[in-house]
Amino acid sequence: MNLESKLLSSEEETADLFCGALGVIAAYNLAGLVCENIRNEESELFLTSALLTAGGILGYKARNFFNRKNREVRRKIKRVKARNKTLAEIAQDEDFLERQGIVKGTFSKTRRVINYALTVPFGGALGCLPGATGIIPLCVYFGKNYEWSESAALDSGKIAGPALASWAFAEMTAKRNSKKLATTAGALAGVNLSYYLAARMNLRVLDSKPDLWLFLGMSALGAIAGGITARKIYRITKKVNETDYYCD
């Protein structure tokens, strides 16, 4: 991959995240408008969490829908479908499976189930504290505009965060985008570390604007550092595996 394609890939990932963030912000304000008429903390928590999750997904998908490279995406999908069809046909060829030493029934379905079982819960766990981090500035800058339960608004981030992360990890697993999966996991881990560090510093993020901005800056730096580190580890690991393969 050349430098130009790397830059395009980085710009597309940034645009995806930006559109997802806009979707979450719009969903938060919609939740505020609706929850003003509910007056039930449990219902407000459920509705806000659901809207935040849906807003993040729809924002991300809207970016993909209007992507100028939509034709290329469709071609990739066709290639993946053709490849899966070929693999399905190969799986029916018992002679071929026997020659390759593959036990029928464990060729693809079991591997896919294991991949989802490992990545999706891991993503959900990593997304809890980033969700709590992301909801705080929304509550500070938009929450005062609506009369609703403050605890429901704050707790909704800890629900929507894991839901969005689980969905993202499931999609990346389905597309077999290992590099993006590793980068996202590293970024979320960095935010988690920043969250724990801020808690140790006793920052008053809801009451103090300087503390809030310090907290957000720490979270952003943690996400960037974690993402870069994870991507480098992924590249090194991939290069080592490729070297071992060619040596064998």
Image (cartoon, rainbow, N blue to C red):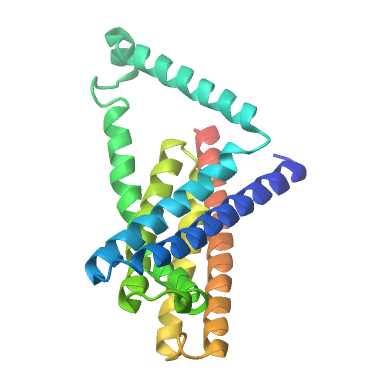
Which of these two is toward me, 80 or 142?
A: 142
Q: Quadrant of the N terminus?
A: top right
137 shown above or below 239: below
Q: Position of residue 56 (x, y in %)?
A: 47, 54
Q: Position of residue 116 (x, y in %)?
A: 32, 42
221 shown above or below 161: below
Residue at the spot 45% in from the left edge and 57% down from the top edge: 185
Residue 233 appears in the rendering: no
Q: Position of residue 137 (x, y in %)?
A: 50, 75
Residue at the spot 36% in from the left edge and 60% down from the top edge: 160
Q: Position of residue 198 (x, y in %)?
A: 45, 84
The outermost residue toward the front is 37
Residue at the spot 40% in from the left edge and 79% down from the top edge: 196
206 shown above or below 173: below
Which of these two is toward me, 133 or 62?
A: 62
Residue 232 horizontal side relative to residue 40, left or right = right
Count the marks: 0
Residue 118 appears in the rendering: yes
